[in-house]
Image (tube, rainbow, N blue to C red):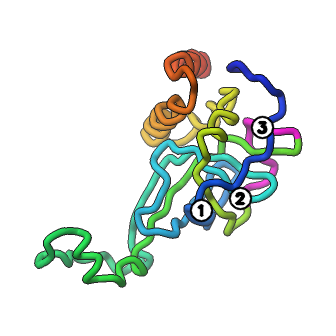
Amino acid sequence: MAIQRTDEHMTQPTQTSPRLGEVVEASSTEVTVHCYQLYGAAPLGALVRTSGERPVYAVVRNVSTAPIDTARRPVARGSDEPDEAALYRSNPQLAKLLRTEFQAAIVGHNTADGIRHYLPPVPPRIHSFITLCSDAEVRDFMQRLDFLPLLLAGPSPLTDEATAAFLRQVASAHDDPTAFLMAAGREMARIL
């Protein structure tokens, strides 16, 4: 289903957003990203992309923070601290002992001919940089809704919540958010 597309082939994205992290695990359908900053993940439902000439686009469907060493569970440290910021100042090692990661469902990729709303021929490379897509990139990507089956194919309830969060976020990048959400709702009803 097309939504007022003015140009069949979109241009290559520009590197405007700061890097969030790197791909540490990749498959044909999903990437896992290790964030550079503790608690520095993209929000649930955000559209992100890999770096490089032919970026892969993905929607964040799960965010987690956990110890790097899974055999060592975090312990409470703040009984004498006035707030969380003070706790982290008193324990600067926490940023090195914990990690924030997110999983994102692959929903498209860029080719020499523009954005394609289907799985790429190969997964993104490990250590590919990940950035949050700008509003302009979101609008370019959202010119078509034929990627929705890829997003809806994941495990519930993550899929339902991630899809709803994604549509809420990308609607704000459109000139007429209500018309966009109605078109997306019709397309999802057709798919489901």
- Earlier sequence position, callout 1 versus callout 3: 1
* CA–CA distance in space, label 1 to label 3: 23 Å
Instruction: Please state the horizontal and vertical placement of residue 52, each as a whole percent of the image.
Output: 77, 59
Assess whether residue 160 is covered by the magenta stretch.
no
Q: Secondary structure at mark 1?
A: strand
Q: Which amino acid, mark 2?
A: Ser
Frontmost of labels 3 and 2 is 2
Residue at position x 59%, y 62% in the image: 19
* CA–CA distance in space, label 2 to label 1: 9 Å
In-image side of 82 versus 4 (left or right): left
Instruction: Please state the horizontal and vertical placement of residue 181, each as a whole percent of the image.
Output: 52, 21
The residue to which callout 3 is attached is: 116
Asked if disc 2 and disc 1 are in contact, CB closer than 8 Å, the reply is yes
Front position in the image: 57 or 158:
57
- Residue 25: image quadrant is bottom right
Front position in the image: 82 or 35:
82
Residue 1 appears in view = no
Asked if disc 3 and disc 2 are in contact, CB closer than 8 Å, the reply is no
Q: Which amino acid, mark 1?
A: Arg
The residue to which callout 1 is attached is: 19
Residue at position x 60%, y 45% in the image: 134
Compared to residue 48, the image places residue 150 above or below, namely above
Residue 168 marker: none
What is the span of residues highlighted in magenta in the rendered image?
113-124
Give the residue at the far right of this rendering.
Answer: 112
The residue to which callout 2 is attached is: 51
Frontmost of labels 1 and 3 is 1
